Every structure is written in C-alpha cells, then in structure tokens.
C-alpha cells in the first residue's frame, strides 16, 4: 500500500476511533444506570426485542465499531482490546439468549466503561 493511502486510512481510523470512544463514554454511564438496550442493534437482536425499544445511539455505535475494525483490517493492525472489538464482544454476549448466565445490559455497560 502506498504511504499516502496508508496515511489517509490511518487518519480516518483515528477519527473514527475518537468518535466511537466519545460516544461510548457519553452513553455507557446512562446504559449502566438504566439498563437500556445499547448492545442490541440491527446485527445483534433477539426476536423478542423491538427496534423502537433501542436507544438511537445503538446503530451509530455499531456502525462506528464496524468501520473501525474494517479500517484496522485494511491497515493490518490488531483489533483485540480495542473499543470496537470489546463493544462487539458485548453485543455478542448480550444477544446470546441461550446463555442464562450472560451479563445483562447494565453489567456489560459498566464493564465496557471500566475497560475504556
């Protein structure tokens, strides 16, 4: 990859990750308190959840997380331990309705906030 293309992608990644972190730091305290469905979205949603129950930020966070991971993949950078990877991990856990011991929205929000 050309240096100019790499630099452009790197700058784009930095901007996306700043937006993602800022959004998460703003909504996670609220989700930890209220238990709102921040970890459900169009990609991770059990049948019993209705889209109008989701906070408006859930799709934005999902989009930013996916974009971050895509850019990291293009730049061949690790994703493990990033806010995007941890958010998607929380979504996966929260949507696994067969696991009766999974953490709920409040616990996942508190955990992710502590990790950031």
Image (cartoon, rainbow, N blue to C red):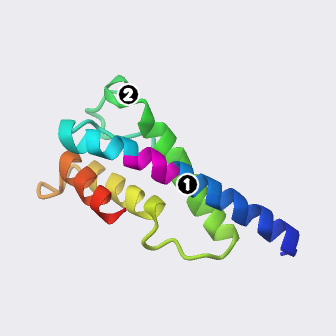
Residue 55, percent from left and from top: 36, 31
Looking at the rendered structure, the number of numbered marks drawn on it comes to 2
Quadrant of the drawing holding the N terminus:
bottom right
Among the two numbered marks 2 and 1 on one chain, the one whose residue lies closer to the N terminus = 1
Q: Quadrant of residue 54?
A: top left
Q: Is residue 97 visible?
A: yes
In this view, 6 is above or below 27: below
- Residue pictured at 28% horizontal, 44% vertical: 29
Q: Is residue 66 visible?
A: no
Quadrant of the drawing holding the C terminus:
bottom left
> Dot 2: few (<14), some (14–19), or many (≥20) neighbours within 10 Å?
few
Predominant SS of the magenta segment = helix
What segment is highlighted magenta in the picture? 20-25
Q: Nearer the viewer, mark 2 or mark 1?
A: 1
> Dot 1: few (<14), some (14–19), or many (≥20) neighbours within 10 Å?
few
Residue 6, percent from left and from top: 79, 70
- On the picture, is 17 further left or further right than 11? left
- On the picture, is 102 further left or further right than 44? left
Residue 11, percent from left and from top: 71, 61
Among all residues in the image, which is located at the extreme top? 52
- On the picture, is 45 further left or further right than 104? right
Instruction: Residue under label 1, please give it.
Output: 18
What secondary structure is marked by label 1?
A: helix
Was residue 4 drawn as part of the magenta stretch in this picture?
A: no
Q: Could you give the CA–CA distance between mark 2 and mark 1, rounded to whole angstroms?
A: 27 Å
Instruction: Residue under label 2, please give it.
Output: 51
In this view, 6 is above or below 60: below
- Residue pictured at 29% horizontal, 49% vertical: 95
């Amino acid at each position: 990859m050309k240096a100019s293309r790499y630099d452009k992608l790197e700058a784009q990644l930095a901007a996306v990750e700043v937006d993602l972190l800022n959004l998460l730091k703003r909504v996670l305290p609220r989700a930890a308190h209220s238990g709102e469905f921040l970890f459900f979205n169009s990609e991770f949603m059990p049948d019993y959840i209705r889209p109008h129950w989701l906070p408006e930020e859930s799709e934005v966070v999902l989009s930013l997380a996916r974009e971050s991971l895509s850019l990291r993949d293009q730049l061949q950078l690790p994703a493990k331990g990033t806010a995007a990877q941890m958010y998607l991990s929380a979504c996966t856990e929260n949507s696994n309705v067969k696991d009766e011991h999974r953490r709920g929205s409040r616990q996942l929000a508190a955990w992710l906030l502590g990790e950031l």
